[in-house]
């Protein structure tokens, strides 16, 4: 396939006029600045991009569901619908997030995902987003900062329980969240040191102060779940998790740019504090994404959805989002003054690096997967190419 007349998003995180050539499911050649390209084989499929932006397929490493389904439904049907929908909007790889559920229920959810992953690898699923891993938001979190998580299922961090999760998932767990300040988590540093070489440990739904969070990062935790949300606020005398993350250069931070969770000024401040190279856009979408207003569930709790807000029926707490990752990118660019080139990196190569899959995903580079997205000048979706084939 030859995709011509496009602005290619390069490894330098810039757009340059060019041509992308794919062969089978890989990128075979990237020609930049080319005004003319001769096609010898008349049978070669050619796509005229008409001046569109050509982006790598996006990667959402923290979302719960869409189209009425949730990864925690624990069914093949749920994962099939989720992966197909995500691919259709330009999110070609995913690492869904689990909620705080009973341990056995989580093991079942993880085992279902592992089985679906095998089916994908064997070509026994529809052409949907690649399941790259799972992001475990609970159950080792804080009751104070639980947000839309069910407090009844919160437990102290435990290596043996984590190992149960990883075994059930057949190694698919890529992130495990903890609240290091919680009672029972006094040995969080020990927990982190024992597992940090096989999984990314994130600070998630935590009320940790600066010193406790910094100790966890120094022990090897390297990820922050939805920066600003479900953690103490940053203040000049108590910088908390946000300040500790800013002072830890190895830590990557998720951020939700849906226009609901965080004020645009706070988003811009985060980029200045952390540095753009450490920011990852996530959608944190729940099953109501792509669905009409109404009442849904998240982690077994009732959620009311109206417009772009999802709130717990019980107390009005934000319960994830109903915004997709591409729309978060658009919002960041159009309403938050984040440069397009920066925003694209936060939804492509940065999550790929955080997942440890950047050798195949996240950029338009020879040898990587031919997962490409064409956006017009208004950032509206025109075409999705998955594994070198145009999705209908």
Image (spheres, rainbow, N blue to C red):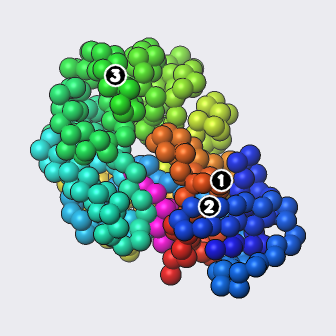
Q: Residue furthest bottom?
A: 42
> What residue would you read off at disc 1?
365
Secondary-structure class at tag 2: strand
Quadrant in the picture for residue 39: bottom right
Q: Residue furthest right?
A: 35
The answer to whether the residue labelled 2 contacts the one labelled 1, judged by CB atoms less than 8 Å apart, is yes
> What residue would you read off at disc 3?
192
The correct choice, above or below, for 15 with respect to 252 in the image is: below
Name the residue rendered at 28%, 33% in the picture: 141
Name the residue rendered at 52%, 34% in the picture: 252
User: Closest to the observer: 293 or 20?
Assistant: 20
Q: Position of residue 319 (x, y in %)?
A: 35, 52
The verdict on residue 86 being magenta is no
Q: Of the two numbered discs 3 and 1 on the same chain, state the one appearing first in sequence.
A: 3
What mark, if any, has residue 27 been given in the picture? 2
The verdict on residue 88 being magenta is yes
Location of the N terminus by quadrant is bottom right
Q: Where is residue 212 in the image (x, y as percent from the top left)?
A: 39, 16
- Distance of mark 3 from mark 2, alpha carbons? 38 Å
User: Closest to the observer: 202 or 143?
Assistant: 202
The correct choice, above or below, for 174 with respect to 248 in the image is: below
User: Closest to the observer: 200 or 116?
Assistant: 116
Q: Position of residue 254 (x, y in %)?
A: 49, 41
- Nearer the observer: mark 3 or 2; the answer is 2
- Distance of mark 3 from mark 1, alpha carbons? 34 Å
User: Badge 2 local density, few (<14 within 10 Å), some, or many (20+)?
Assistant: many
User: Badge 1 local density, few (<14 within 10 Å), some, or many (20+)?
Assistant: many
Q: In this view, does 17 lie to the left or right of 209?
A: right
Q: Residue furthest front?
A: 40
- Nearer the observer: mark 3 or 1; the answer is 1
Q: What residue span does the magenta drawing correspond to?
A: 87-95
Q: Is residue 323 left or right of residue 286?
A: right
């Amino acid at each position: 396939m030859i995709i011509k007349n496009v602005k290619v998003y390069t490894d330098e995180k810039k757009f340059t006029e060019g041509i992308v050539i794919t062969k089978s499911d890989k990128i075979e050649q990237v020609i930049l600045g080319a005004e003319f390209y001769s096609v010898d084989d008349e049978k070669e499929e050619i796509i005229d991009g008409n001046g569109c932006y050509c982006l790598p397929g996006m990667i959402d490493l923290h979302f719960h569901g869409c189209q009425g389904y949730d990864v925690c439904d624990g069914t093949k049907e749920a994962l099939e619908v989720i992966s197909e929908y995500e691919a259709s909007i330009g999110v070609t790889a995913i690492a869904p997030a689990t909620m705080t559920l009973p341990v056995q229920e989580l093991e079942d959810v993880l085992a279902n995902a592992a089985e679906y992953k095998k089916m994908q690898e064997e070509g026994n699923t529809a052409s949907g987003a690649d399941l790259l891993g799972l992001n475990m938001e609970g159950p080792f979190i804080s009751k104070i900062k639980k947000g839309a998580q069910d407090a009844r299922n919160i437990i102290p961090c435990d290596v043996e329980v984590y190992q149960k999760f990883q075994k059930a998932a057949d190694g698919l767990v890529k992130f495990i969240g903890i609240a290091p300040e919680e009672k029972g988590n006094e040995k969080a540093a020990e927990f982190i040191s024992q597992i940090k070489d096989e999984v990314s440990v994130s600070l998630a739904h935590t009320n940790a102060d600066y010193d406790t969070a910094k100790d966890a990062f120094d022990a090897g935790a390297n990820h922050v779940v939805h920066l600003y949300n479900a953690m103490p606020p940053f203040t000049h005398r108590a910088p908390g998790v946000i300040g500790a993350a800013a002072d830890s250069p190895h830590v990557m931070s998720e951020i939700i740019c849906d226009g609901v969770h965080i004020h645009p000024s706070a988003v811009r401040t985060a980029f200045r504090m952390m540095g753009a190279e450490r920011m990852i856009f996530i959608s944190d979408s729940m099953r109501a994404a792509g669905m009409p207003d109404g009442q849904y569930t998240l982690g077994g709790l009732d959620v009311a959805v109206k417009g772009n807000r999802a709130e717990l029926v019980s107390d009005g707490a934000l319960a994830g989002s109903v915004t997709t990752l591409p729309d978060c990118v658009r919002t960041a660019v159009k309403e938050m003054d984040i440069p397009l080139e920066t925003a694209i990196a936060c939804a492509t190569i940065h999550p790929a690096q955080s997942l440890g899959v950047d050798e195949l995903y996240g950029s338009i580079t020879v040898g990587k997967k031919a997962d490409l997205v064409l956006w017009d000048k208004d950032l509206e979706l025109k075409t999705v190419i998955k594994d070198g084939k145009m999705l209908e």
